[in-house]
Amino acid sequence: MSDLLANTPEFSVSELAGAVKKTLEGAFGRVRVRGEITEFKAYASGHQYFALKDESAKIRAIIWKGSVSRVGLRAENGVEVIATGRITSYPERSEYQLIVERLEYAGAGALLARIEALKVKLATEGLFERKRPLPMLPAVIGLVTSPQGAVLQDIKTTIARRFPRPLLLWPVPVQGEGAAEKIAAAINGFSNLPANGPVPRPDVLIVARGGGSLEDLMAFNDELVVRAAAACTIPLISAVGHETDTTLIDFVSDRRAPTPTAAAEMAIPARLELLADLAQKSARLTGALARITAQARLLLDRAGAKLPDLPNILGAARQRLDDRGERLTLALPNFFNLRRTGLERLAARLVHPRELLARGRNAVALLDQRLAAALPNQLRTRQNAAALLAQRLGAPLPGHLRESRLRLENLSARLETVSYAAVLARGFALVTNTKGAPISSAAQVSPGAALTIKFADGDIAAKAAAKTAQLDLGL
């Protein structure tokens, strides 16, 4: 036993790990492994690490940075794929792993499941609900498709036949590695073109490719492409595959065409059809206008037949106008004369305010004179009655009667001092006219007017000699 152990070669850990690595790489070389991606992680270095598993086993896998863009699809957790690569080991952890060079979906079932899951996700976000109308006659049409193949030629031929319009092509690969990224970039590029830039901005955009298998059309089921189409600011028509083929870009586009030729027919109307439609509408419009004009003329003739004779109506109205004008010419002077006569009569009845004032002053003077004459008489009568009463009673005059007598004597004396007679006694005179009305200013006196001058001791007749109110006293 000891001799057997002595003949067994001895390895270091590194040597054993290296030998295992060489054995794995030499025994398997390139392999294709089918499994579900799990534990996916992308590092900042650009390398991607994940594991492939099935019901009972799991293997580590790596996509180096330089191979990420060439593996064919993006690695995601939960996707069943077929990974092609080399088996090797990682000696530091004593693990074997798969260096992946290409990824493919594991059959149509896995592809359809992936497409359905993405469809549900995008529908939940509301990306399938926006539908915009297409322009009737676009000035420029944008096209995203492969520069090779019959699709481009079919669209160009259809546009030239129906209504020649400028066609702006953005060439992209429509399948294979990197196709989805380039298609999304083309859609975003058209969408971001400025309206008045050096490159004309399309009015409608067509994304098209010919028919193919489900794997061939997978670029148009890619999330990048679908989101780019949903965010496009230009009305978009999808024409991917044959009539029975359906991709996710069809759900977010504004219109879905069964074929590229049908997409071109949707994008541009037929010129001959437009001309025929225009001619038909023009004929209908001309006929309608003719019928409207005839109907209006008939209604006008019927209304005109019911109208009276306008010349006779105008003649009678003109005659009435002339008659009213002549009567008005004669009536206005008479009207003004009547009004003037009425005003003169009214003015003759009116009394000048100065005369009214003079009459008032004269009345006040007369009342003052009468009051001044009556008050002393009334006072003496009351005094005599009081004295007589006192004699009869055989008693002197009561004090309150004596006080009343004194107050009456004082009041009489004060009235005599403010009466106009007292004023005349101080050397003034009162001038009145023939009616006895006082004259307070020279403007009231006319030359030759008869006046009466009242002094304290009598009256004198006078006559006004001139405007200067010099008086002829007739002495």
Image: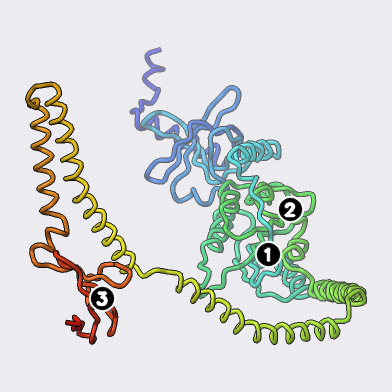
The answer, for residue 312, to whether it is visible in the render is yes
Q: Is residue 13 above or below residue 278?
A: above
Real-space Cα distance between discs 2 and 3? 142 Å
Q: Position of residue 307 (x, y in %)?
A: 88, 75
Element under label 3? Answer: strand
Q: Quick check: 308 left or right of 434?
A: right
Q: Position of residue 339 (x, y in %)?
A: 55, 76
Q: Which mark is residue 135?
A: 1
| Corner quadrant of residue 378 | top left
The residue located at (79%, 71%) in the rendering is 270
Q: Position of residue 464 (x, y in %)?
A: 24, 82
Q: Which mark is residue 250?
A: none
Q: Earlier along the polypeptide chain: callout 2 or callout 1?
A: 1
| Foreground pick, 383 / 315 | 383
Tags 2 and 3 touching, CB below 8 Å = no
Q: Position of residue 82 (x, y in %)?
A: 61, 39
Q: Is residue 313 above or below residue 51?
A: below
- Identify the amino acid type marked 2: Gly
Q: Quick check: 362 left or right of 138?
A: left
Tag in front: 2 or 1:
1
Q: Earlier along the polypeptide chain: callout 1 or callout 3?
A: 1
Which quarter shows the C terminus?
A: bottom left
The residue located at (64%, 55%) in the rendering is 175
- Identify the amino acid type marked 3: Leu
| Corner quadrant of residue 144 | bottom right
| Foreground pick, 379 / 127 | 379
Q: Earlier along the polypeptide chain: callout 2 or callout 3?
A: 2
Residue ID for mark 2: 212
Element under label 1? Answer: loop
The residue located at (29%, 58%) in the rendering is 363
| Foreground pick, 364 / 474 | 474
